[in-house]
Amino acid sequence: MPKPDQAQAPEDPPEPEEERDRPVLWLIFIAAIIGIVIAMTRAFPEAVRTPEDWSSVIYSLGLLVLVSSGLFSFRDRLQLAQHLRHAAIWGAIVAVLALGFAYADDLEGVSNRVRVAFSGGV
């Protein structure tokens, strides 16, 4: 029996297997991204020529890593369907806004026609 002045440190529970596999997933992900960039620069050598082009590639890769890091942070895989549904809803909202912006001139004519139809006048 330990003495009261000697506190016994609680043992840390073992890490779940999912937690131990995360660095491996990140390394595979980074290797895949590097492989894709190398393949794309060999397939399209004229696409990335200037330092500005390379900075755009690096910026895009950083954005990709930022967005995809959410995929590696799921602790409960059962919520994946809910997250995908929310992403689909946001995608639909962005698509409707993009269509509204693309057809803004045509939609302006629709509002004028509706106004004339309900005004009862000429």
Image: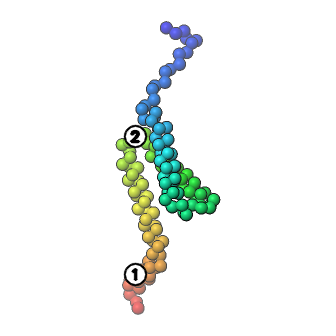
The residue that label 1 is drawn on is 114
| x 41%, y 83%: residue | 113
Indicate the amino acid at tag 2. Answer: Asp
Q: Which residue occupies 49% across, 59% down?
A: 43
**Badge 2: residue crowd in 10 Å (few <14, some 14–19, many ≥20):** few
**Quadrant housing the C terminus:** bottom left
Q: How is the image coloured?
A: rainbow
Residue 70 image offset from top left, x and y in percent: 47, 47
The residue most toward the bottom is 122
Q: Position of residue 104 (x, y in %)?
A: 47, 75
In the rendered image, residue 30, in percent from the top left (x then y), is placed at 50, 45
Which is more toward the observer, 55 or 62? 55
Q: Residue furthest right?
A: 51
Amino acid type indicated by mark 1? Val
CA gap, disc 1 to disc 2? 50 Å
Asked if disc 1 and disc 2 are in contact, CB closer than 8 Å, the reply is no
Element marked by disc 2 = loop
**Residue found at x 57% / y 54%:** 58
Provide residue 38's location: percent of width, then percent of height.
Answer: 52, 53
The residue wearing badge 2 is 76
In the image, which is nearer the foreground, mark 1 or mark 2?
A: 2
- What residue is drawn where x is 57% and y is 61%? 48
